[in-house]
Amino acid sequence: MNERKISEANFSDTGYSYTLSLIAGKYKPIVLYCLMEYEPVRFNEMRRYVGSAADKTLSQTLKELERDGLIHREMYPEIPPKVEYTLTERGHSLVKVLDQLCIWGEKNRPDPGENNKCE
């Protein structure tokens, strides 16, 4: 039997760690979910959808997702400038993962009539 030893393991070497590094953060999963459901999305639409994010924070989140190859930013030469965001092919490949998070949440969230306090 091949016994695995935690003393020889390094979480940062796992695919799980890499995936989390791309989607972790307060707004990244929300942005990805928004684009998964409604693309293309303009910045102001995204801001309304996300709700509480400051413009600078949302802008930084979008830049990080673009840098990681998960979203595409298309700027149109108009006045005022028009910018739309869509998922890239790589971003679309995450849809199955995000769908599973959504399915798990639907199955496991408390019923509206239940007491939602942690014990």
Image: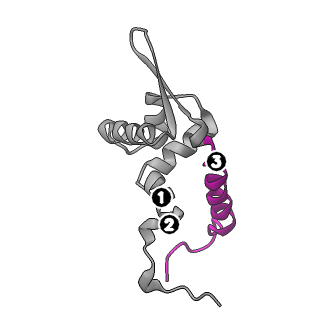
Q: Mark 3 or mark 1, which is nearer the start of the sequence?
A: 1
Q: Mark 2 or mark 3: which is in front? A: 2
Looking at the image, how many numbered discs can be counted on the residues?
3
The residue that mark 1 highlights is 18
Whole-percent x, y for residue 102 in the image: 64, 56
Q: Secondary structure at mark 1?
A: helix
Whole-percent x, y for residue 66 in the image: 44, 37
Tell me if residue 111 is in the magenta stretch: yes
Q: Mark 1 or mark 3: which is in front? A: 1
Query: Which residue occupies the extreme front position in the image?
Result: 2
Q: Quadrant of residue 83?
A: top left
Q: Are marks 1 and 2 in contact (CB under 8 Å)?
A: yes
Disc 2: CA contacts within 10 A as few (<14), some (14-19) or many (>=20): few
Residue at 49% over, 43% down = 31
Tell me if residue 24 is in the magenta stretch: no
Disc 3: CA contacts within 10 A as few (<14), some (14-19) or many (>=20): some
The residue that mark 3 highlights is 95
Residue at 38% over, 45% down = 52
Whole-percent x, y for residue 115 in the image: 57, 74
Magenta segment boundaries in residue numbering: 92-119
Q: Mark 3 or mark 2, which is nearer the start of the sequence?
A: 2
Q: CA distance from mark 2 to mark 3?
A: 20 Å
- From the viewer's side, name the closer residue of 98 and 103: 98
**58 sits left or right of 39 in the view:** left
